[in-house]
Image (cartoon, rainbow, N blue to C red):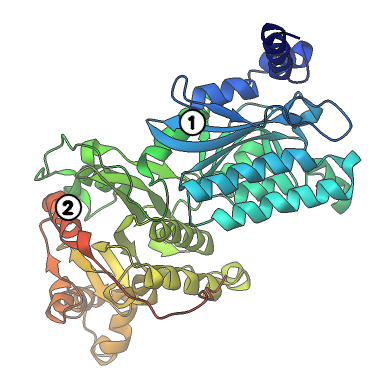
Amino acid sequence: MSMDEKLAMRNEAREKISLGGGAEKQSKVKSSGKMLAGERIKALFDDGSFIELDAFVSARGKETAADGVVTGYGTIDGRLTFAYAQDPTVIGGCIGEMHAKKICKVYDMAAKMGAPVVAMLDSNGARLEEGVLAQAAVGEIMAAVARISGVVPNISVVLGTCAGSSAIIAEMSDFVVMSENESCELFVNSPSVVTATTNKAYSADAKSVAAVCGNAHFTAKDDALAIETVKLLLSYLPSNNLCDAPELECMDDLNRTSDNFMGVDGEYDVRSLIAAVADDGAFMESQITYARGAVTGFIRLNGTTVGVVANQGNEDGSVLCGQAIEKMARFVRFCDAFNIAILTFTDVEGFKVSADEENWGLARKSARLMYAFTEATVPKVNVVVKKAYGGAYTAMNSKQTGADIVLAFPTACIAAIAPEAGVGVLYSDRLKAGENRDMLIAEYKAEVASPYNAAAMGYVDDVIIPGETRPRVIAAFEMLRSKRVSAPSRKHDNMPL
């Protein structure tokens, strides 16, 4: 057989593999508004940069095109990235022995090369006909995902069915992006299983549930926009835990002031403050519909990525609930793992008063946030906007939990207890004597809870003009660039999870 004939055979085999489960199944996928696995890969990577690995891998004893998953590496905006895309046209994209081996190779190579991983998930779950091999295969993927956690960024993109163990694999990643295509779903137990098991009718929009409960950090209208979301997110992140995030040239005025802060004495949206500080007003917010009392996401300051954690003063009465605490704590830990500085905007009255919150472990969850900020060694700057009371403030990146710089607005009110309650303790005799309660509250704020009082004790570094927040915050982070922290030797911490 001549070389030309051998090459023709090779090309024919690759062409057959590219058809996945066949033209008919591919046509069905496209008619549902979804992209094919190969199209997803092509949309993710820079033109012509993707190199496929293990294209000829097949299940033992049968032909399964690429065994239902396209794997490989390439560049995104010129940066090395690994990825895999499950192919639902081949055995429903189910996870089997060889399918898992391909995926595990991607994770292991990404860790060695120090490059991010993007997992595009579209699978009906474990390949049941493979029995214990399928069970082991899923477990091997989970172990591989755990090994790269905190080493390289890991993003899961849910573009179809993601159920059972696959949902757990997705949630083990750093961020989950989910398409709003009607065929996309993310759950451990399907609505039908829940209904059959509990004998209670249960139906839910899987996409809405995933966003509201926090399982999905970002949602997008379709596959293409979900992939664009991934590329934007990666632009904020470093390639691994030993390097910094990409720095962009900042065309925005470093000394720009803003009038957005003038309304903080009344009702305000903290996102307007974040935008006023960020380069070009750009803010990539995560988990928008989950725990609305907390706002998290990424901005750039002088071209450098900064993670933002903020209290949303006009949501949930400026109090911390369990979900908001979990949302903020996990985001803080991600930023710390990947050398991303943290900026907080604090406006917190206390912890949510609720029997349900107590029963759901509010004390343990609160300890988690306190722990996350305390163990974070990256540069940390806190801007106190209004209320900063008691333990809730302590947990929100205070000096006591390791904030490097704390700035306060003149509107800030910093105290061990809310003024409304404080006057009842400190001024009880004066209240009994008939003095006006509102006047006593104003006195408490001026004398006890004043930001100048906190500054006099060294717990606030400066009381600033709100409109000058951007230049002051940028100056603080520039100073903190060379921050170094040594920690005691230990195998790992024991965070209160």
**Residue placed most toward the observer, 418 or 329:** 329
Circle 2 — which element?
helix
Q: Nearer the viewer, mark 2 or mark 1?
A: 1
Report the amino acid beneath label 1: Gly
**In this figure, which residue is indicated by the disc labeled 1?**
74
Instruction: Please state the horizontal and vertical placement of residue 102, each as a whole percent of the image.
Output: 68, 39
**In this figure, which residue is indicated by the disc labeled 2?**
474
Vertical placement of residue 155 versus 4, above or below: below
Residue 321 appearing in the image: yes
**Residue placed most toward the observer, 295 or 410:** 295
Q: Quadrant of the C terminus?
A: bottom right
Residue 269 appearing in the image: no
State which quadrant residue 386 falls in. bottom left
Vertical placement of residue 29 versus 293, above or below: above
Instruction: Please state the horizontal and vertical placement of residue 456, each as a whole percent of the image.
Output: 12, 79
Circle 1 — which element?
strand
State which quadrant residue 125 falls in. top right
Callout 1 crowding tier (Cα within 10 Å): few <14, some 14–19, many ≥20: many
Say which residue appears at 31% left-offset and 80% top-offset. 416
Q: Is residue 34 left or right of residue 238?
A: right
State which quadrant residue 85 falls in. top right
Vertical placement of residue 28 versus 275, above or below: above
Say which residue appears at 66% left-offset and 27% top-offset. 182
Mark 2 or mark 1, earlier in chain:
1
Say which residue appears at 70% left-offset and 44% top-offset. 166
Report the amino acid beneath label 2: Ile
**Residue placed most toward the observer, 43 or 254:** 43
Could you say which disc has been placed on residue 276 in the image? none
**Residue placed most toward the observer, 186 or 6:** 6
